[in-house]
Amino acid sequence: MLENLIIAPDIREKLLRPDHNVKEDEVRECFLNHDGFYLEDDEEEHQTDPRSEWFVGETDRGRLLKIIFVFRDGNLFLKSAYDANAKTQRIYNDLKPK
């Protein structure tokens, strides 16, 4: 089940904090339920090489999460995951191909 998803120990800890409160299984569900459209993260403080990408994904229970990751060497390196607020959902839906 999504063997190429890499979650570093510090990111795993961040997911458990109250401001995120995201389970690893929920992140995996979002990737598995997703249609493959990603946006590049263009925020200056989040610049990486390669560029971070993000999407709004849905868990099996209907929770919408913003998933931020870096794709490198065939692996998905999770950077963060948290509830997608209305603004994030709107941006994603407005830019998503119809």
Image (cartoon, rainbow, N blue to C red):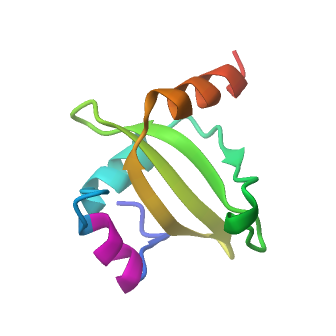
| Residue 14 magenta-highlighted | yes
The residue stretch that appears in magenta: 9-15
Secondary structure mostly seen in magenta is helix
Q: Position of residue 18 (x, y in %)?
A: 22, 60
- Residue name at image x 40 percent, y 75 percent: 11
Instruction: Using the rendered view, name the quadrant where residue 77 is placed.
Output: bottom right
| In the image: residue 66, left or right of residue 55 | left
Looking at the image, residue 65 lies above or below residue 27: above
Q: Residue 92 appears at what percent x and percent y?
A: 61, 31
Point out the image quarter for the N terminus.
bottom left
Considering every residue shown, the one lying at the far top of the view is 98
Position above or below: 76 against 33: below
Which residue is at a point 31% across and 57% down the rendered structure image? 20
Residue sitting at x 36%, y 55%? 28
With 18 as the anchor, is 79 left or right in this view? Answer: right
Q: Is residue 79 above or below residue 37?
A: below
**Residue 84, image x, y percentages:** 43, 38
